[in-house]
Structures are given as C-alpha cells and as structure tokens.
Image (cartoon, rainbow, N blue to C red):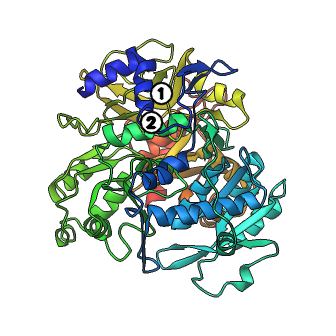
Amino acid sequence: MNSDALFKRSIEDKENFWKEQAGNINWFEFPTDILSPDKNNYPQWFADGKLNICYLCIDQHIEDGFGAQTAIIYDSPVTNQKLQYTFNEAKEEIAKFAGGLASLGLKKGDTAVIYMPMIPQTLFAMLACARIGVIHNVVFGGFAPHELVVRIDDCKPKALITATAGVEIAKRIPYLPLVEKAIELAQDKVDHIIVYNRRLTENKHEMFDGIIDYEELVKNSEPIDCVSVESTHPLYLLYTSGTTGKPKGIVRDTGGYAVALKFSMKYIYGIEPGETYWAASDFGWAVGHSYTVYGPLLNRNTTIIFEGKPIMTPDAGTFWRIISEYKVAAMFTAPTAIRAIKKEDPNGELVRKYDLSHFKKQFLAGERCDVATLDWFAKHIGVPAIDHWWQTESGWPMLGLMTYDENYTIKRASAGKPIPGYDIKIFDENGYELDAHQEGYLIIKLPLPPGALLGVWKDYERYQKSYLSQYNGYYFSGDGAIKDEDGYIFITGRVDDVINVAGHRLSTSEMEEIVSSHPDVAECTVVGIDDNLKGQIPFATVVVKNGSLITEQDLEKEIIQMVREKIGAVAFLKNAMTVKRLPKTRSGKILRKLIRTLLDGKEFQIPSTIDDEKIIDEIQEKIRGYRA
C-alpha cells in the first residue's frame, strides 16, 4: 500500500487501521476496545489491552533468539569511554535494578524522577521503572535546581535517581549539590535518593546522608519479571514549557505509544530490525524518550547513547565518525547540530575521512531547517535530509514523509505531509479552514492517533484549556502553518510565547517572571529572535525603575545570571536591552510580535491597536545603539 492510500485509510477507517497496527506488537491481553472515550470524553486507544513496554524492548527479543545482538552502544568522547550491551546484558542490569526499586517499596502507579546525563544507566533506569509499572519523569541534566523542584512538587516521586556528575566538553558538572538544593526546596520529602557514582574525580565531599548507591542496589537485588499494565497506564511524564510559566506534565500512555513507535520505525524512518539507528538527543527531551530508548529497542534496532558535542569532541567530524564506526543506517538530530558542523567544516573536509556508504537517511526535527544547511548536507553527505515536525505532546511525528515508500519527495523548507492518524487542518482564528498558501493555525481533528498525550498530569482543566478549548473537536498545536497545493505543510512558528532554542522548547513567560523579579526592573518582555545557529534565542527588553543607578551592562550581566540559576544554561539568554517603555496596545497588552520583528530587523506593519507610534522609533534607535 502506498503512503497516500495508507494515510487515507488511517483517517477513514481509523479503528481497523490501528487494530491492525496493534497486531505488530505482543500483548499480554490483546485489546478488544480499540477506541473509546475516558471519563472526560477524551478518546483513548486500546483501553482494555495489557502489556509491558520493557518486555517488548528487551525480553521479547531474547525469547525470539536475539539475546546476543548488540542493543546499546555507549560512545563518550568526553570521558574516552566506549561500551556495548547485548539484549541479554541489558536485561540483567534492568531486571536487577527493577528488583532493587521494588525492594525499596516502589510499585505500579508510583512515580520516580530521573535526573541523569547521557549514560547507559539512564536508559536502564527508564526501562527498570517501566518493568514494574513505575511512572518515570526524566529531567534534563542541564536544568538548575528550581526546574527539578517544580517537577518534584508536581509529580511527588517516591524515588529520585541521579548520578554524581555530567560532563560538558571537558568540564565536570556536579549533580549532587544541585540535587541536595532541590530536595531542600521541595515541598514534599523524596523517600529514596539513588546515585550512580561515575568516579570521574574524588567526590566524597559531595555526598550527603541517605544516599543509596546505584551499583550496590543492583548488585544486592534479585531480578524481577515484567508486570502487566493496562494500555492506558502512564509510562512516563515529560514536562514541557507552558505559557503560564509553570511546566505542563505531559502524560504518555503505554499501549498506544508502543503501537505508534513500532509503526513509525517501519513506515516513517524506513528502518529494518537489526539495523543501527541513532537519535542524537538528550534523554530529557521527547526525542530521547521516543527514538533513543523506546522506538529503536521496540523495533530491535541497536541504539546509540552519545555523550558529547557535535563539533568539539574532538572536532566537527564526530557525527560522521560515529555513523561510520557503528554502521548507522539512519540518524535523527536537530538542524542546530548540522549548522554548527557546517560552520566549523564548510568544505566538508572532515566528512571525507569516513565511510558513510551504509548511511541511508538523515532526519531533522526540533526547528525548521534552513535551505542553506540542506544544500550543504546534500553536497557533502549525499543522503536525503528529511525535515519533519512533532511535539512533546504527540510523542512521535505529526508531519513527515513515509520513507518506507521509496517514491517519497522532499520539499525543502517543508516539514512534510500529515502522518497517518493525524487529520491536520489549517484554520483561521474564527475556525474556518484556509485554502492553500494561506497562513493560519495548525490544528488536528480528534481523535489523535495512538501515542499522543493522555493529558496533563492531574490537571485535566489545564489540558482542556491549553489544547482543546480553541476549536471544538480539535487539538490546538500552538503553531502557525501554511499548506501548499500538494498537501505539504510549512511550519511558520509558535503562536504563543514558547520559543524553540536549538530544539528545546522554553517558556519566555517563565523567563519574564525571573527578569521582572530583579529589583531594578520595572517591566520587561522576553521574545525569541532569529539565530543562525540555534534557530531562536531569547532576548529580554527591559524598562528600568525610575531612580535606578545600575548600568545597562551590570543589569544585563545580573539578568543573564538569574535566568541561568533558575532555568539553566539551556535557556541561552545572553541579551538584555533597556528601553524607556515597551510598545503596548491601548488596552495595555505588550506588542511582543512587534518587538520581535524590530529586533530581527524585518519589515513590519504598525499595529492599528498601538497606543503611541513614536515608541517604534525609540526602540529602533536603541537597537542600533545596542548592536553597535
């Protein structure tokens, strides 16, 4: 069946379509209730099915005779380590760690926070939780204590699993002082703190009372079998930036997610079981969950855990070295990484050092990929670079190309076509569908396909308000888009105040709260401006309180430090410009889009609602002075 026919059937005969796909994974109890509403009348998939995703990722392949196949490759140029684990070896560690968690009293339905770097033990911890039905929440290791506290207070974990340190290029990043600070600030006590000691340096002084050693727990525990969980049992929580500043805990189910990921590995990524697949993403992001851990292992692919940077460990040929060394068939990364490599190796000299003959496809997501980068990739790598689009909320691609069908056609700057199951429309603000080449809101008709979010953790009202209230019967993506006459969709950017920094979604309102807390700041706004390397970066525009004696340079330095302490270096706020006043509507709403357009130096129209047009000249003059 070609991709157009596949998509058509997924929309017109959705229950039978997804029932057939559900037959491609092994269930403990195959579902008979394929699509049904929950108590809030939100559609659910496979509600009466039972399974375990750790079983599907590990145990099943061993039972099928593939226990000796390499499941996981760990490549860490920052620590000069390379390790490989077969499915048999991975199962031994995961099953014993799951037994250790159970011995501490963790059981199905409990939550655990995982705050760890890019090491195999992070993957083991995720699958150990899944093995016994514990809901995991992985937190990006670069986040500051405040971000960890928000998640602890919201999901109330029974255990926090962490490591002694991460490594950024050549710098050791101690985690335990951050964890200790977060535990002090959290509202509720975390019962168990489990620490994997990386032994990168002497670290006894960082330890604190009550720590459980990861290796000792594994060593002293008996392996435990997979428990059966309902298809709708939450597998994990993953927090994503919200427009209110407080992150939203996206809830992922188990059965629908497993079915969707299995489908995606075959049809979207065109990967056969046994091949090596590499998603160069941190575990803490949605890509790391779906395509470093669960998707490849479900499909019996070898997955790669990479600890390093694309251009500095040791040089801009690192990606090509890994692809060559491990015979990677397909790779997934953010366009930022390719742009960084292009900047360091514009003539592709490092590419030519490696054998990429088995490399079939490069997938890009997290932000739109510019044409210049696609051209560089085509010239020097010579394999298709396929941009696609999805969200933390969806858990797997919403737009893309079905590469199992070799007749697919790439349109540069497009994120592709709707993926089977996603009935995507482009609406205007009044809910009318737009014709081709008209920009509007990207929305999706309910039901969403399997694998998409179950909701927001213990806050259905917020879920309803954020995603379902804008258009009745539709999911609101929060992105603007244009569709062409061939059905390809071009994403134009966020329509709220969440920005995309190198593929990481960050809330500008959260940054605004931090900036406005500075004692010399009267009011402020933070917008995402265009950046050649990272796609977008935050830029703060600040009005200083009357009578303040602080210099602009000192204020900028202090604001940058405050955001770094509260959110982490990932926020990448490096610019804070003072102005006399902010442009506003007559009703007092800050004109953020106008500020962003002015900072980007783009053409603009004066909004009809602006209260004083003279402010535009004021800000433009300030920008010229700031850039000078």
Quadrant assignment, res 382: bottom left
The answer to whether one can see residue 5 in this image is yes
Residue 198 sits above or below residue 443 on the image? below
Farthest bottom residue?
Answer: 202
- The amino acid type found where label 2 is placed reads Ala
| Number of marks | 2
Residue 613 vs residue 30, the one in the foreground: 30
- The amino acid type found where label 1 is placed reads Pro
Crowdedness of circle 1 by 10 Å Cα count: few (<14), some, many (20+)?
A: many
Q: Which residue is mark 2?
A: 260
Under tag 2, what secondary structure?
A: helix
Residue 509 vs residue 577, the one in the foreground: 509
Whether pointer 2 and pointer 1 mark residues with C-beta atoms closer than 8 Å, the reply is: yes
Residue 19 sits above or below residue 108 on the image? above
Residue 461 vs residue 502, the one in the foreground: 461
Quadrant assignment, res 237: top right
Q: Is residue 245 left or right of residue 73?
A: right
| Spot occupied by residue 390 in the image (x, y as percentages of width and height) | 44, 38
Image point 45% across, 36% down: which residue?
260
Viewport quadrant of the N terminus: top left
Residue 599 sits above or below residue 39 on the image? below
Q: Is residue 591 left or right of residue 371?
A: right
Crowdedness of circle 2 by 10 Å Cα count: few (<14), some, many (20+)?
A: many
| Spot occupied by residue 108 in the image (x, y as percentages of width and height) | 71, 46
User: How much space separates mark 2 and mark 1, taking CA atoms?
Assistant: 8 Å
If you read the primary sequence from the N terminus, does the residue marked by circle 2 or circle 1 appear first?
A: 2
Under tag 1, what secondary structure?
A: loop
Q: Which residue is mark 1?
A: 449
| Spot occupied by residue 557 in the image (x, y as percentages of width and height) | 61, 66
| Spot occupied by residue 578 in the image (x, y as percentages of width and height) | 60, 53
Viewport quadrant of the C terminus: bottom left
Image point 67% across, 53% down: which residue?
515
